[in-house]
C-alpha cells in the first residue's frame, strides 16, 4: 500500500515536472528537443489515425460483422460488382463510405450505432436480418440520395458516358436522367444485395421524384 502511494507520488511529480518543462522549456530540455519530440508525437498520432482509418475501410473489417448473418457478403458474391470480365470490382467501402474527409468521418461516427446493434444482436441471424432489411435499405437509399450517389459516381462518371454504346433501355433512361438530374440510386436499387420484400428495382424512393 505504502509502496503504491510512493509510486503514485513519484509519477505525479514526474508529470508535474514534465508539464513545467513543456510550458517553460529549461536547460534540461532544449526547445529544439521539445520541438522534435512534438513532431515525433504528431507523426505517431497521424500514422495511428491513418492506420485506424485504413483498417476500418476494408472489406475484411465490414465482413467481420456482416458475414455473421450470412447476408450482406453472401448476396454480394457473384454480382457484377464482385466478379466480372475485367476484374474491376467494388468493395463494401467503395459503395458505402465516402472518400472525402468530412463525410467519411461523419459516416464513421454513424457506425457507432452499428457497434451498438452488433452487441444487441439486431441482425445476427438471417431471419432477423430479413426483418431488419427494409429499415437498413431505406436508410442506405436515403443516405445515397442525399449524397447524389457520389460513391457510384466515383467510378461511373456521367460526363464520360457514351450513351450510344449503352443498351437501348439504358440509353433511354439515362438520357432522361441526365436531363432531369436524377440520381443513380433512384433507379439502381438491389444491384449488390437482395431487395427487401415487396420492393421492385424501379420503385420510387421517398423524397425522390421518379
Ligand atoms: C461492429 C460490427 C459491424 C461492423 C464492423 C460493420 N457493421 Fe455495418 N452494421 C452492423 C449492424 C449491427 C447493423 C444494423 C444497424 C442498425 O440497426 O442500426 C449494420 C448496418 C449496416 C448498414 C445499413 C444501415 C446503415 O446505417 O446504413 C450498412 C450499409 C452497413 N452496415 C455497412 C457496413 C460497412 C460498409 C462496413 C465496413 C466499413 C460495416 N458496415 C461494418 C454491424 C457492423
Ligand atoms: C469501385 C468502382 C465502382 C463503384 C463504387 C460502383 N461501380 Fe458500378 N460498376 C463498376 C464496374 C467496373 C462495372 C462493370 C462490371 C462489368 O464488367 O460487368 C459496373 C457495373 C455497373 C452496372 C451494370 C451492371 C449491373 O449490375 O447492372 C450498374 C447498373 C452499376 N454498375 C451501377 C452502380 C451504382 C448505382 C453504384 C453505386 C451504388 C455503383 N455502380 C458503384 C464499378 C463500380
Ligand atoms: C431514370 C433511371 C436511371 C437513372 C437515374 C440511372 N440509370 Fe443506369 N440504367 C437504367 C436502366 C433502365 C438501365 C438498363 C438496365 C437493363 O438493361 O436492364 C441502366 C443501365 C445502366 C448501366 C449498364 C449500361 C448498359 O449498357 O446496360 C450502368 C453502368 C448504369 N446504368 C449506371 C448508372 C449510374 C452510375 C447512374 C448515376 C450516375 C445511373 N445509371 C442512373 C436506369 C437509370
Ligand atoms: C455496388 C455497390 C455496393 C457494394 C459493393 C456493396 N453494397 Fe451494400 N448496399 C448497396 C446498396 C445500393 C444498398 C441499398 C439496398 C439495395 O438497393 O439493395 C446496400 C445495402 C446494404 C445493407 C443494408 C441491407 C440491405 O440488404 O439492404 C448492408 C448491411 C450492406 N449494404 C452491407 C454491405 C457489405 C458488408 C458489403 C461488402 C461485402 C456491401 N454492402 C457492398 C450497394 C453496395
Image (tube, rainbow, N blue to C red):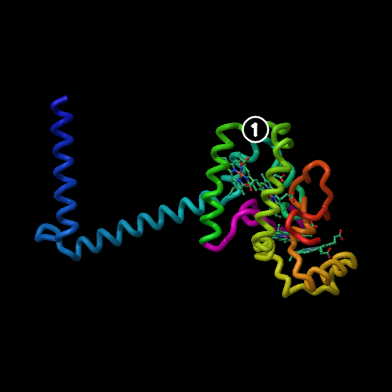
Q: Which residue is disc 1 drawn over?
A: 124
Q: Please identify the residue farthest to the top as the structure is shown.
A: 1
What span is colored magenta in the figure?
Answer: 83-101
The quarter in which the N terminus is drawn is top left
Measured from the top left, where is residue 51 in percent x and y?
A: 46, 53
Q: Main secondary structure of the magenta part?
A: loop
Instruction: Left or right? Give the position of 184 relative to 100.
Output: right
Instruction: Left or right? Give the position of 41 relative to 209.
Output: left
Assess whether residue 93 is covered by the magenta stretch: yes
What count of labels does the image hold?
Answer: 1
Dot 1 falls on a residue whose secondary structure is: loop
Ligand 1 falls in quadrant: top right
Measured from the top left, where is residue 41 in percent x and y?
A: 31, 56
Instruction: Left or right? Give the position of 60 relative to 81.
Output: left
**Residue 175 visible somewhere in the drawing:** yes
Q: Quadrant of residue 132?
A: top right
Above or below, comparing residue 186 to residue 119 in the picture: below
Residue closest to the eye, 33 or 118: 118
The response on whether ligand 1 sits within 8 Å of label 1 is yes
The quarter in which the C terminus is drawn is bottom right
Label 1 neighbour load within 10 Å: few <14, some 14-19, many 20+? some
Residue at 68% of width from left, 44% of height from top? 136
Assess whether residue 88 is covered by the magenta stretch: yes
Residue at 64% of width from left, 51% of height from top? 92
Measured from the top left, where is residue 46 in percent x and y?
A: 39, 58
Q: Please identify the residue farthest to the left as the structure is shown.
A: 27
Residue at 75% of width from left, 70% of height from top? 181
Measured from the top left, where is residue 166 in percent x and y?
A: 84, 69
Residue closest to the eye, 135 or 156: 135
Residue at 52% of width from left, 61% of height from top? 102
**Residue 85 visible somewhere in the drawing:** no
Amino acid at each position: 500500500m505504502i509502496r503504491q502511494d510512493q509510486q503514485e507520488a513519484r509519477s505525479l511529480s514526474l508529470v508535474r515536472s514534465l508539464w513545467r518543462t513543456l510550458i517553460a522549456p529549461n536547460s534540461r530540455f532544449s526547445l529544439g528537443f521539445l520541438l522534435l519530440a512534438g513532431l515525433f508525437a504528431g507523426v505517431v498520432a497521424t500514422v495511428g489515425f491513418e492506420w485506424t482509418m485504413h483498417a476500418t475501410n476494408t472489406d475484411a473489417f465490414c465482413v467481420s460483422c456482416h458475414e455473421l448473418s450470412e447476408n450482406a457478403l453472401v448476396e454480394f458474391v457473384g454480382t457484377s460488382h464482385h466478379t466480372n470480365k475485367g476484374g474491376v470490382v467494388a468493395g463494401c467501402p467503395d459503395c458505402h463510405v465516402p472518400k472525402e474527409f468530412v463525410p467519411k468521418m461523419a459516416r464513421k461516427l454513424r457506425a457507432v450505432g452499428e457497434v451498438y446493434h452488433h452487441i444487441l444482436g439486431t441482425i445476427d441471424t438471417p431471419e432477423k436480418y430479413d426483418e431488419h432489411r427494409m429499415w437498413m435499405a431505406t436508410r442506405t437509399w436515403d443516405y445515397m440520395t442525399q449524397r447524389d450517389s457520389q460513391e457510384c459516381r466515383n467510378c461511373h462518371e456521367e460526363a464520360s458516358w457514351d450513351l450510344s454504346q449503352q443498351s437501348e433501355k439504358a440509353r433511354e433512361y439515362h438520357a432522361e436522367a441526365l436531363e432531369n438530374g436524377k440520381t443513380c440510386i433512384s433507379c439502381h436499387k438491389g444491384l449488390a444485395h437482395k431487395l427487401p420484400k415487396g420492393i421492385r428495382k424501379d420503385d420510387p424512393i421517398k423524397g425522390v421524384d421518379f
